[in-house]
Image (tube, rainbow, N blue to C red):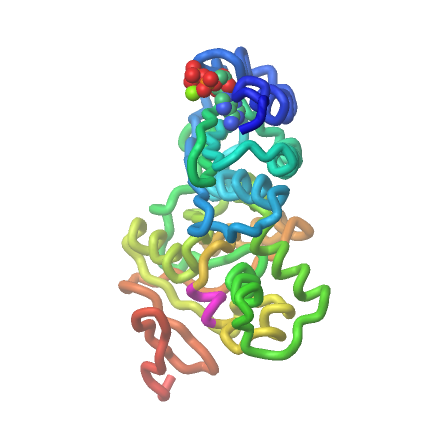
Amino acid sequence: MSALSEFSLIKQYFENITTERSDVILGIGDDCALLKCPEGQQLAVSIDTLVEGVHFLPDVDPVSLGHKSLAVGLSDLAAMGATPAWFTLALTLPELDQQWLAAFSKGLACLAKLHNIALVGGDTSRGPLSISIQVHGFVNAGDSLRRDGAKKGDLIYVTGSLGDAAGALAMKQGKLTKGVASEVEVNFLCQRLEQPTPRVEVGQMLVGFASAAIDISDGLVADLGHILHKSAVGAELDIEDLPISTALSALSTEAEHMALFAGDNYELCFTVPPKHKNQVQKKLKGQCQCTRIGTITGDDGIVFFKDKKLIKLSGFGYEHFSTGH
Ligand code: ADP
Ligand code: MG
């Protein structure tokens, strides 16, 4: 390690890199941060860890890594309808690479400023590269978007497009199954994998309108499954309605499968009672793409419709269930 001490490393790359907030009484530099929570609000808290070789490839651009490390936490806040406020960062570094630190800090600070979330503390140690970020946000008491509120008849929506991150990974591994990627398509898919957009504003807009929400980190089927389980309901999905980007469908014969089962999306999946349908569509117009993909049912599990036929989920794929529907 170079002459740069842990103290000056923190000062140089992590102190004062985010916007100042009046609710941070004491930020980086003491044993604890001191923070002020607004009256009548609840604190939404979530932590995620990204480990090299498990959650990201060793050659990933450090600016993107800084962005993504915070984006995954912001996505959790979005899924609760919370407003971002503060975060802490536990960084384990194999070596002191100043170029890497400057780039990582830049990616982190850029997204943090966009969402007015302040870095208030952390921990720095040496070891295999790993990044843990704990995010804190506010939500009016009783207003949060939880997983357990979906009701029979509610409409199911997702933001953005699904499966792009898996497509990007397949591309990086030379496993794409169709065509030759153009530069525009390559950039789009890489951006979706490495710099996902947390749907923070959409989450906040859904407060009071959506009956349940989750962010898609493990795949649509798995994450919608959590809503269904917690809400004790089932779902019908229309395969044709899944939002799949033109880049992904141009480059993979597996696009539909990726949209259903692949993770790392950081889009929101949410349910809306029919009476709020028009308001939600109006509110989200111009925000980001939002697609209705199905309906909540009173049954157990998920059934799929494709070409007007009922299809049943099995294991990691789906199979034709009957041809008569
Ligand atoms: P302690 O030994 O009391 O835990 P540290 O020396 O680990 O204190 O940290 C000193 C200060 O720097 C603390 O306020 C801590 O929150 C902050 N800090 C340490 N590492 C980071 C980091 N990677 N990002 C932001 N703040 C950090
Ligand atoms: Mg410490």
> So how many labels did they put on this image?
0
- Residue 280 included in the magenta stretch of the image: no
Q: Which residues are magenta?
A: 257-261
Image coordinates for residue 249, horizontal then vertical, percent = 59, 73
Position of residue 212 relative to residue 253, above or below, is: above
Q: Is residue 39 visible?
A: no
Looking at the image, is 46 positioned above or below residue 179?
Answer: above
Residue 178 at x, y percent in the picture: 58, 79
Using the image as rendered, state which of residue 221 and residue 177 is in the foreground: 177
96 or 39: which is nearer to us?
A: 96
Q: Quadrant of the C terminus?
A: bottom left
Q: Residue at x 57, y 26 (%)?
A: 2
Instruction: Find residue 318 and report its horizontal and vertical position in percent.
Output: 36, 75
Which residue, as the protein is rendered here, is positioned at the far bottom? Answer: 324
Where residue 321 sits, quadrant-wise, is bottom left
Q: Say if 244 sits above or below 111 in the image.
A: below
Above or below 125: residue 94: below
